[in-house]
Amino acid sequence: MTRTLEDALKEVLADDKRISKYEAKVIRELVLADGVVSEDEKALLEKALANNDFEGPAFDLLSSVLLRSHMKE
């Protein structure tokens, strides 16, 4: 079974409602695995960023993924 970004976000938020730097790296690899950040992935990441679900380094890591994806458009 392929793990979706939505499943991964729910899983990492389930314990302490925050995404650590390590968890953010796992999520980044999941998003970038196919080389494309889909519209659904962008929306999920933007929602998590807006909800401030990230610890500082994790926020920086995943916001850079979004920034790069927007720059490619």
Image (cartoon, rainbow, N blue to C red):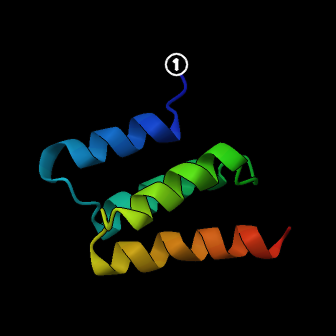
Q: Locate residue 8: give its quadrant.
A: top left
- Across and down, in percent, residue 1 comes to 52, 19
Pick the residue in front: 56 or 28: 56
Residue 66, position in %: x, y?
62, 68
Q: Is residue 20 left or right of residue 34?
A: left
Identity of the amino acid at label 1?
Met
Q: Residue at x 50, y 41 (%)?
A: 5
Mark 1 — residue?
1
Residue shown at the point (50%, 69%) measured from the top left: 62
Task: Residue at the far top: name it.
Answer: 1
List the single residue furthest toward the left. Answer: 16
Residue at 42 percent across and 66 percent down: it is: 49
Helix, strand or loop at label 1? It is loop
The quarter of the displayed image where residue 69 is located: bottom right
Q: From the viewer's perspective, is 53 left or right of 65?
A: left
Sort mark 1 into few (<14), some (14-19) or many (20+) by Cα contacts within 10 Å: few
* Residue 22 at x, y percent in the picture: 33, 64
